[in-house]
Image (tube, rainbow, N blue to C red):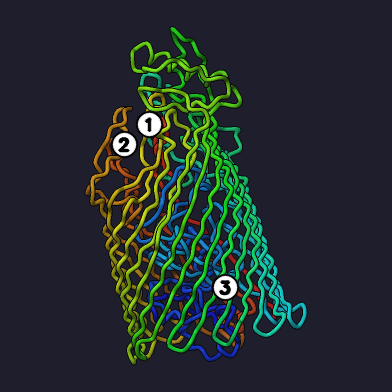
Amino acid sequence: MKIRSCMTLAGGVSFFALGTVAHAQSDKILDDLDPNVIVVTAQKRSESANTVPISITALSGDALVDRGVANTADLVKVVPGFTVTHTNSQSPVYTLRGVGLYLYDSGIGASPAVSVYVDEISIPTPLSVTATSLDLERVEVLKGPQGTLFGQNATGGAINYVTAKPTNYATMGGSFTYSRFDKIEASVYASGPLSETLSARVAGRSVYGGAWQQSVSRPGDKLGTTRELQGRVLVDWHPSDGIKFMLNGTIASNRSDTIAGQFLVANPAVPPLAFPGLVGTPPVNQNARAADWTPGLPYRADDSFALISLRGDFELSDSVTVTSQTSYQHIKTDRLVDQDGTALHILDINPYGSAKNFDQELRISGDSGKLNWVIGGNYGHSKLSNNLYYSTTHLSFNGVFSGPPFFIPPYNQTLSTNDGTVKTYAVFGNLEYELSPNLTVQGGIRYTNSKRAATSCTSDPETPDLLASFINAYQLVNISVGAKTTPFVPITPNGCVILTPAPDLTPTGPFDINLNENNVAWRTSLNYTTDSGSLLYANISKGYKSGAIIPAGGLVTTSYLPTKQESLLAYEIGAKVPLADRKIQANVAAFYYDYRDKQVTSTVADPVFQALPGLSNVPKSRVFGIEGQLTARPIDGLNLNLAATYLETKVTADYLTGVIQQGVVVQVNAKGLSLPNTPKFSATADAQYEWSVGAEVNAFVGSGLTHVSRTTANFPSNGIEIALPGYTLLDARVGVSAKDDSWRFTIWGRNITDEYYVISDNNSVDVRYRYAGMPVTYGATLSFKIE
């Protein structure tokens, strides 16, 4: 069965195309399904999304290709209320319905608030999600806390990528894309049976080219080349009736250029010592391709990801199944990022490290007529190495002790290390009971205990005597003016330069941190299905995001303190209504979030470096929103989709955050301010028309629109609010295809109006700079299938 046209789904899900359904469904069930329905696993069992009482957006693998969704960041094109920005080390930050976590580190040390999964396997760091978009059956975006079944760190929601599974018949396919900036992307897959009980699927993808950024100071110097390789092997074994195993081996490599920033304004930490060339640097104009970086340095990532997992399903009876899922992941990152947007060597950062993650889940589920249930447990263990290497030549504070009476040469680099472990234990359960043929009630609960331990140290391993001399001079100055009341304790070369807060200012050596937390996430829902097929639901849920310990690079211990876990109490009501004989589907939801201890990046006062990023918790905040989805097929071949989200966010309790004013950190109360990265209004729209142009060929034309309103990048800094302006992006596509979908040729354009838009605005130590979104791109894609 091949279904290529855009589809509509009752139950709060917008579907632009239907590929194949969940692996557990037989071909007979697939043939019997209404063509407007897709089977999802949002509740860790296969079911029609029409009956799932949460807001979901889902797309098939074919629809992702049509809409130009090549990675998780591209989901903003199809999921209103979902935003993506970047930290100053270029880790992606996902926010869904105003819930997200912005961290300034490499991203390995802390999980996102919008969790990403591949076949229900948690991907612990956003850096490794490039491998998730390979050879997909579909993606499911679940909105709101998903902690009862998907675990902690899903306060904002969950993005579950479902891979295309091995088939019981031989098939192969692939695609080739050539686009602007000489970017080439090729992918291929092959699938089929190896024996009566064994089948396999192999897939690979390569992306190369696309250098799109141009240096404003060196004509002809470019940056932005993509270098990605991905591969996956799936093996499906059914040794006997009621027993099946799925083995997944995935590897990915990313050696793409890191993106350069656009310089905006100098903001020296020590204004009298600001580098003259920096002060005179003009801001970059609003040209997406214009940027700058220090010449001759390898601004490139060297990231790798490896996953192996084994899932086993054992049917104890017709209604009871035991599922075991075991996974091991090894993630490495090493990248150089320019953090000033100029040709000067003001500040470069090299985040590098690794994560080794083992996870085991065991659950038993059953369906006894009116009652569906699942109970299980989970154990996870992670070993983390998270490091930040800072390199500089012209930072203003480097010359603080270069004159009399010390005459200490400026140091040019520091290394902040953070090595630790995370152990997590959890038990969970979920019940769904049919009170009447039209009314069901659901309830779920999960208890989680996590233990984090880490050791931090900041030093200078390359020129150890310089940094140690610098900090020792700082101690002596404070003794001379009476600011340090304890005896002088010299730091030996290559020793940790972390000090206790004033007035002690005593070296700590390696700084040990422990964070032990536990929580109980829960969810309850009441759902009513009308005789006409409409679903009305109301649910209340509570989720948690675990605390974080990350490297800092500051002088005093306050820069290294962790954040504690955050929690979210969510209320949601919704309706999912099919109309006009299911040619129109209208879905609407309203939600209110009571947000406690939201984890945010703050500005920490440092006695030498003046101001450094740190972590803190906003005691109380709230999110209110309304979202709607409308899909229609008014005539054969025409498919329309419109979705929008409106958000109101606010800090509702006193929260003192550090802001930089004239080179000094002062405390400002953020009560009453909106949460960062939460645009009030976002919308997506898509239209496609397909018609026959011959006995064997169809033609199609389509267009997509993405609108995101103005939002703030972070809480006020430099005495002003840093805004990310709103933007509207227009995509278009036209092409031809075989009626049996054995081949498809598409010419496409993205951001065809070449609108300039900003995806993040950052304060570094001496500068403010921003990252721009992609300019207009266009290309052609040829895909094929052989069965």
What numbered label is drawn on residue 658?
Answer: 2
* The N terminus - image quarter: bottom right
In the image, which is nearer the foreground, mark 2 or mark 3? 2
- Disc 2, SS: strand
Task: Give the crowd class for mark 2: few <14, some 14-19, many >=20 residues within 10 Å.
Answer: many
Q: Residue furthest top?
A: 405
- Disc 1, SS: strand
Eyeballing the image, is 712 above or below 376? above
What is the C-alpha distance between the residues marked 2 and 3?
A: 46 Å
Q: Amino acid at mark 2?
A: Gly
Query: Is there any visible trace of residue 84 in the rendered image?
Result: no
How many numbered discs, if any? Answer: 3
The residue located at (41%, 68%) in the rendering is 445
Eyeballing the image, is 514 above or below 460? below
The residue located at (31%, 36%) in the rendering is 658
- Disc 3, SS: strand
Q: Amino acid at mark 3?
A: Glu
Residue situated in front as seen by the camera: 749 or 164: 164
* The C terminus - image quarter: bottom right
- Residue 247: % across, % down: 67, 68
Q: Earlier in the sequence, mark 2 or mark 3?
A: 3
Eyeballing the image, is 775 above or below 735? above
What numbered label is drawn on residue 137?
Answer: 3
